[in-house]
Image (cartoon, coloured by chain):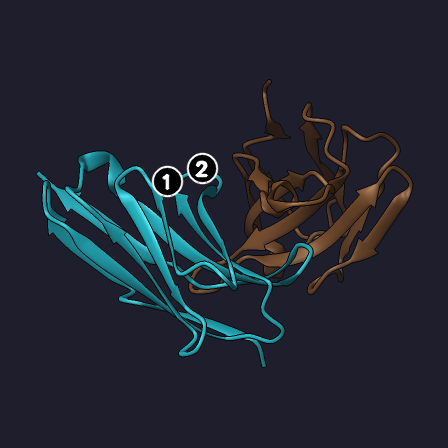
Chain colours: A cyan, B brown
């Protein structure tokens, strides 16, 4: 069964600190892996998309990594800001818009 | 561009009532879809469409109908609401084109539905 597991479920960090969110997947076939940010009461917004051949991709203070051999991905947030408080969802695609969603990591950045 | 819009933002229904959740996009995207998001679960696909006049079922289609008469609109109909349909519903769209562009999916702001 295709699954995407994220850890931790929730995380509290101080403003200005860095953090890393983890995503492990058992999905086949693999097309691409995406990270989304979902603010409370809003729809998910894409942060990064990585295909099989990419092992790192950045979007401002967000850096995603992908290890296709171990089927692991991480999202690193640098110098966190209060606006980073949100849920971060890892999604693995098995084909065009055939998506397996993780349950997300809820991040709270505290002043 | 307004992107993907959804109405209403909140709705309360009684068991057995019917209603339509509206979704529209102004990006000329061929692909549109509906998801539901429940606590402790990832988003699950209800129905999707790859163009006007073409719809198909996703992972959890029971109790929902869709139609796609135009590229812009993709309404979701609840035929006879049940408490199990209490959820947050998201509409999304994406282009169908070669390259990475077709990997992007744009989500609407969601409709929070409560069925009592």
Gap in Å between the C-alphas at discs 2 and 1?
A: 5 Å
Placement of B8 over or under B105, stated as above or below: above
Give the labeled residue for mark 2.
A42
Left or right, residue B31 beside residue B38:
right
Q: Quadrant of residue A89?
A: bottom left
Q: Chain of mark 1?
A: A
Density class for disc 1 (Cα within 10 Å; few <14, some 14-19, many ≥20) is some
Query: Dividing the image into 4 quarters, which one contains the N terminus of chain A?
Result: bottom right
Q: Extreme top residue here?
A: B1
Q: Quadrant of residue B43?
A: bottom right
Q: Is residue A51 above or below residue A109?
A: below
Who's the residue at 25% across and 34% down the image? A83
Question: Residue B7's x, y, as percent?
Answer: 62, 29
Do we see residue B82 in this rendering? no
Q: Residue furthest front?
A: A53
Q: Which residue is mark 1?
A: A39
Q: Residues within 10 Å of mark 2 (few under 14, many from 20)?
A: some
Q: Is residue A2 left or right of residue B19?
A: left
Outermost residue, bottom side: A1
Quarter-wise, where is residue B69 in the image?
A: top right
Secondary structure at badge 1 equals loop
Give the image location of residue A74, x and y in percent.
Answer: 32, 62
| Above or below for A82 versus A30 | above
At numbered mark 2, what does the secondary structure look like: helix, strand or loop? loop
Using the image as rendered, state which of residue B36 and residue A44 is in the foreground.
A44
Q: Residue at x 58, y 43 (%)?
A: B104
Q: Is residue B59 visible?
A: yes
Q: Nearer the viewer, residue B114 or B109?
A: B109
């Amino acid at each position: 069964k295709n699954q995407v597991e994220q850890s931790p479920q929730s995380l509290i960090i101080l403003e200005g600190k860095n953090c890393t969110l983890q995503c492990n997947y058992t999905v086949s076939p693999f097309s691409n892996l995406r990270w989304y940010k979902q603010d409370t009461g809003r729809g998910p917004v894409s942060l990064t998309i990585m295909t099989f051949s990419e092992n790192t991709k950045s979007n401002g203070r967000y850096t995603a990594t992908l290890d296709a051999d171990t089927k692991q991905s991480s999202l690193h947030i640098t110098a966190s800001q209060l606006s980073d408080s949100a849920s971060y969802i890892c999604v693995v695609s098995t084909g065009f818009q055939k998506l397996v969603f993780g349950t997300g990591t809820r991040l709270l950045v505290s002043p | 561009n307004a992107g993907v819009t959804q109405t209403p933002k909140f709705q309360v229904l009684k068991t057995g009532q019917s209603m339509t959740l509206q979704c529209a996009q102004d990006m000329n995207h061929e692909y549109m879809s509906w998801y539901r998001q429940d606590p402790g679960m990832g988003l699950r696909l209800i129905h999707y469409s790859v163009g006007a006049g073409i719809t198909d079922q996703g992972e959890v289609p029971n109790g929902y109908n869709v139609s796609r008469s135009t590229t812009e609109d993709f309404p979701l109909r609840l035929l006879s609401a049940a408490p199990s349909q209490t959820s947050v519903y998201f509409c999304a769209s994406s282009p169908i084109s070669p390259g990475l562009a077709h990997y992007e999916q744009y989500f609407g702001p969601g409709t929070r539905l409560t069925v009592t």
